[in-house]
Amino acid sequence: MPNQTSPLSANQKAKVPFRGGGFQTKSLRLISPVVFICLIALWELGSKTGFISNLVLPAPSEAFEAFMQLARSGMLWTHLSASLQRLIIGWSLGSTLGIMVGLLIGLSSIARAGLSPLVSAIFPIPKIALLPLFIIWFGIGEGSKVATILFGTFFPTVIATYGGVDNVDRSLIRMGQSFGLSRSSIIRKIILPGALPAILSGCRISASIAIILLVAAEMIGAEFGIGAYILLAGSLFAPDQLIAGVAMLSIMGLCFAWLIGRAEKFFLSWR
Amino acid sequence: MDLHLEDISHTYGDITVLQNINLTIKDGEIICIVGPSGCGKSTLLRFIGGLERPDHGQVLQMGEAPKDSLNPLTYIFQDFALLPWRSVRGNISLVLEDHGIKGKKAEPIIADVLARTNLSDFANALPRQLSGGMKQRVAIARALAVRPAVMLMDEPLSALDSQTRELLMDDLMDLWQRDRFTACYVTHNLNEAVRLGHKIVVLSRRPGKIREIVEIDLPLNKRKDHAEHLAEKQAQLWSIMREEARAADKELVHA
């Protein structure tokens, strides 16, 4: 039926309106840097004109100046290396152990029955709450900080890994069995590569968790590290340094995400 | 090597899916199993290859499998079951690796099966780059690589469009002319059954029993010229199955 506003007689033509589209995502590379630069520029403008009080939020240029000062004093590398070391050791140990335990739970019924309730019980505990305990167990030094990150990244990796193993296409496993492949071949050549997408997306999450826990751990009894730097800035009431520290964390997170993105591109090019 | 199915019955929970199946699959013969949906055709095929165990009865292998056969009972699946992270060559090499055939030793075998399935130009392609018909050709090449004594085909053409199905049916026929392999071919497509089967086993609806075994004496390569005879056989099969299929259609799904 023709619509009511412009009734068409039988021999008149009208174009069928286009109704598709609208929900496809397009990759627009330029937008995100533009939004970012505009926000910073607005913020700078607001601070310069006094619309944003300096006490509430320092201008981006001041935060950058604080960062340059840190770099000139030579302390930047001290803080950064201390943080990176904790992060890398804690995260890689946590992920490796997590993948191993996750595979165990995914592959063995006994391990699943025994360990998966345990994982579910311990996973939701905020690891920050356990930090005092870790200090008693592993000392106030590096041990407790690495342990916090390790524990924090271990559980999400376990869950991602055994979820990935569970999701491996059963028909592929049956195919492997039907060709008489050995158990170890099926695990190495079918289950592991099949679970890899889930494991890598688990790594993405655990990397962010690692950064959150890093700062928390460094706020207790650390001399160096970005968390310690931020804590000090807070207690000295130096918001410019605080913003500089937070920006460093954000950049660190971006770098991690980029690295994992590269790894995904490399390992999952078959998708 | 013959296969003998002895009084096979199976239940899932309290539903009997198969009842008293007795069947012999003779060497060099293609047996098609047809039946209404849910009659347990695929389950039966899984029993034959040892992927599942029947509650009652057994599948017997009569005589020794050929010495050069790496995997006597080899499946071809409806969903192809190719590893998406391996190339065509890698997917074939997968089933040879466990037999210690790797690298240089595997090359001639892979080249041979790719040539036989007209895939030589696609050795390095990934499954996602291939059409459905090509994927099933890869799966057939993979099956040929282990020199099976019996091919167990679970609706191998059902995921393909009708033109591709025609092409692949011709390919399967050519392969059989060359190798005379034994095959058990499960399908719901009666046309495939009359084109490829020496014997067609009609199963009844649940619980699946053998209703009838229809033999077609025409050699496979002559069948195209006797379309009428095939149409007759197909009509005969359909008349056997019709009521079963109608009743099966009205049943609730239990699975």
Image (cartoon, coloured by chain):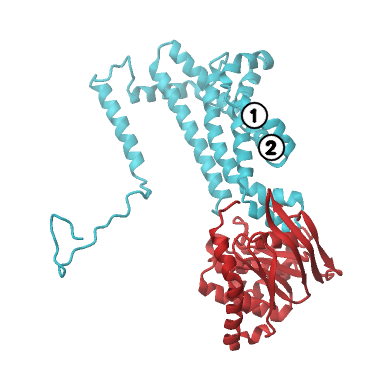
Q: x and y percent of residue A42 in the render?
A: 27, 29
Mark sitting earlier along the chain (1/2) = 2
Q: Amino acid at mark 1?
A: Val
| Number of other residues with Cα within 10 Å of mark 2, as a class: few under 14, some 14 to 19, many 20 or more | many
User: Are discs 1 and 2 located on one and the same chain?
Assistant: yes
Image height check: is B236 above or below A147?
A: below
Residue at 57% of width from left, 41% of height from top? A200
Q: Left or right of B140: which side holds B165?
A: left
Residue furthest out toward the top? A236
The disc label shown at residue A105, or none:
2
**What colour has chain A?**
cyan
Q: Nearer the viewer, residue A195 or B47?
A: B47
In the rendering, at what x and y percent does residue A99 appear?
A: 65, 37
In terms of depth relative to the viewer, which is nearer, B53 or B12? B12
Q: Which residue is mark 1?
A: A119
Query: Residue B253 got which mark?
Result: none
Question: Residue B192 lies in what quarter of the image?
Answer: bottom right
Pointers 1 and 2 in contact (CB under 8 A)?
yes
Percent of width and height locating residue B128: 54, 60
How many residues crowd mark 1 within 10 Å: few (<14), some (14–19), many (20+)? some
Is B213 above or below relative to B244?
below
Q: Is residue A110 left or right of residue A241?
A: right
**Chain for disc number 2:** A
Q: Quadrant of residue A132?
A: top right
Residue at 66% across / 32% down in the picture? A116
Image chain in red: B
Which amino acid type is shown beneath numbered disc 2? Ile
Furthest residue in direction bottom, as rendered = B225
- From this viewpoint, is residue A140 visible? no
- Quadrant position of the N terminus of chain B in the picture: bottom right
Name the outermost residue toward the right. Answer: B63
Q: Position of residue B254 (x, y in %)?
A: 60, 51
